[in-house]
Image (cartoon, rainbow, N blue to C red):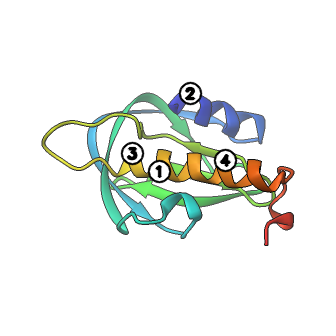
């Protein structure tokens, strides 16, 4: 997941910097989005990576950062292209993993778009 995030960033013009982050980190939502439905403004998520994006890629919006200000979640301004640096699939028995909710919201969005036979541009969603 984090490598996909990094690839999206590189494809859209950002560069990578070394930023080794491992463990449970506090994330903060900076812009509301359908993928963040039902998630508190601050939540913990698992991070396990060596690189991160240096800057926000062209035509992307910043959705979430971690407690050190590192970019954690992005969304293209006109396409359904998302990227997450944290690992929403990782959970443990001691804390609620809001990352699971991000995944569920993503699957719900995909199902909605499939039912509506929408193209991948945001401008066509009611």
The residue identified by callout 1 is 102
Which type of secondary structure does the marked residue at label 1 adopt? helix
The residue identified by callout 4 is 110
Question: Mark 1 to mark 4: distance in Å?
Answer: 12 Å
Q: Nearer the viewer, mark 3 or mark 2?
A: 3
Residue at the image position 42 percent from the left and 28 percent from the top: 49
Residue at the image position 79 percent from the left and 66 percent from the top: 125
Q: Nearer the viewer, mark 2 or mark 4?
A: 4
Q: Along the horizontal axis of the image, is 67 left or right of 50?
A: left
- Determine if residue 71 is in view: no
Q: Along the horizontal axis of the image, is 60 left or right of 26?
A: right
The residue identified by callout 3 is 100
71 or 83, which is in the foreground?
83
Question: Mark 2 to mark 4: distance in Å?
Answer: 21 Å
Dot 2 crowding, Cα within 10 Å, few <14, some 14–19, many 20+: some
Asked if the residues shown at circle 2 and circle 4 are in contact, with their CB atoms under 8 angstroms apart, the answer is no
**Mark closer to the chain start, 1 or 4:** 1
Question: Mark 1 to mark 2: distance in Å?
Answer: 17 Å
18 or 122, which is in the foreground?
122
């Amino acid at each position: 997941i984090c490598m996909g995030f990094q690839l999206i960033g590189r494809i859209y013009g950002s560069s990578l910097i070394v930023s080794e982050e491992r463990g449970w980190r506090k994330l903060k939502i900076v812009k509301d989005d359908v993928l963040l439905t039902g998630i508190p403004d601050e939540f913990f998520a698992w991070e396990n990576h060596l690189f991160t994006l240096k800057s926000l890629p062209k035509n992307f919006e910043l959705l979430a950062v971690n407690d050190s200000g590192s970019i954690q979640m992005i969304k293209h301004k006109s396409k359904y292209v998302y990227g997450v640096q944290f690992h929403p699939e990782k959970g443990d028995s001691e804390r609620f993993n809001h990352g699971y909710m991000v995944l569920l919201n993503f699957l719900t969005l995909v199902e909605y778009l499939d039912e509506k036979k929408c193209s991948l541009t945001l401008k066509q969603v009611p």
